Amino acid sequence: MITRRGLARLGGMLALPALIGRAALAQPAWPNRPVTMVVPWAAGGGADTVTRIFTMGFEREVGQPVNVVNRTGGNGIVGHSSISNAQPDGYTIGCGTSEFVNFKALGLSDIGPDSFELISRIASIPAGVMVKANGPWKDWPSFVAGLKEGRKGQYTGSGVSTGGSWHLAAAGMTKALGMEADRIRWVPSIGGAPALQDLAAGGISVFTGSPIEARPLVEAGQVRVLAVMADERMATFPDVPTLKELGLNWTYANWFSLVAPPKLNPSARERIIELAKRAHARPEVQTVTKDRGIVPVWDTPEEFKAYIKTFGESSATLLRELGLSRA
């Protein structure tokens, strides 16, 4: 016999799924509070600059504060780890840089492309070939002749840690010239700015990093840009030829992307992709990015994954030839 109390309990149990469903539907849509944007590199650098320009538009699209936080250390591992290990609710996302593709190969960390929800690249900065303005090399042919005539390791380069983006730019360039990947001896650096100061002082032979970072020293007559590793000439250096124009089939660019923790909440993922794409296309974001000499890029997640696969294969080959691969 079912008592009145039993009927009430049964009715409550039957109503529970409906209540849970209504509660789930009542959950506020993303975003309903501030968002944290993690940058794994120091303030003022390329990743920080790209992120802050993008965030300017992203904040307007999401309608909530987007706080840029620089979490540095471990050659980018600390910041990338904080993005990967965050709650996958969409409230902690970040700027993933090309280094995370190579962490495993270098034996630095287990972090890799699978450690993130890959949204899109947002910008790239082509590498260039820069030398001391009053040094022995006035143009690309004289630079190439110097590399070929000198002994392996005679000339030095710097700008990032060993195995970093600009190191790979130099290695790929010398390989394309028919020389060893380690023809240029690499001097580890904490960044482009100190390396450029060292270049101007004669402490290193060449800087194969961002011409944008070199611009103040170029304008001051201390550094000369011989070529850029891009498909087209840079708007900020219209008189500088590409390596392709000079007969060398080699391009290289450091890239910056929007990534999130893996297993991201599906509804938050959909909104992030939608609003980020709109933010990236905003005129003020596009204009400021291009005015800085940075190339704006937007992919679908599928295109980004395919790009990373190709990039990772090329990087792995160079790291093996440099004797740096631990994979």
Image (tube, helix red, strand yellow):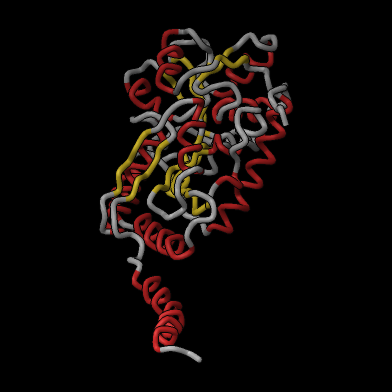
Residue 128's x, y, as percent?
Answer: 50, 30
Foreground residue among 275 and 253: 275
8 relative position to 147: left or right:
left
Most extreme residue toward the bottom, as rendered?
A: 1
Residue 106's x, y, as percent?
Answer: 65, 28
Is residue 61 among the parts visible in the rendering? Answer: no
Residue 164's x, y, as percent?
Answer: 56, 28
In which quadrant of the rendered view does residue 112 lie? top right
At x 46%, y 38%, the residue is: 82
316 relative position to 212: left or right:
right
Foreground residue among 237 and 190: 190
Is residue 242 among the parts visible in the rendering? Answer: yes
Residue 181's x, y, as percent?
Answer: 69, 24
Foreground residue among 77 and 256: 77
Judge whether 50 appears above or below 59 on screen: above
In which quadrant of the rendered view does residue 63 lie? bottom left
At x 54%, y 17%, the residue is: 188
The quadrant of the image that shows the C terminus is top right
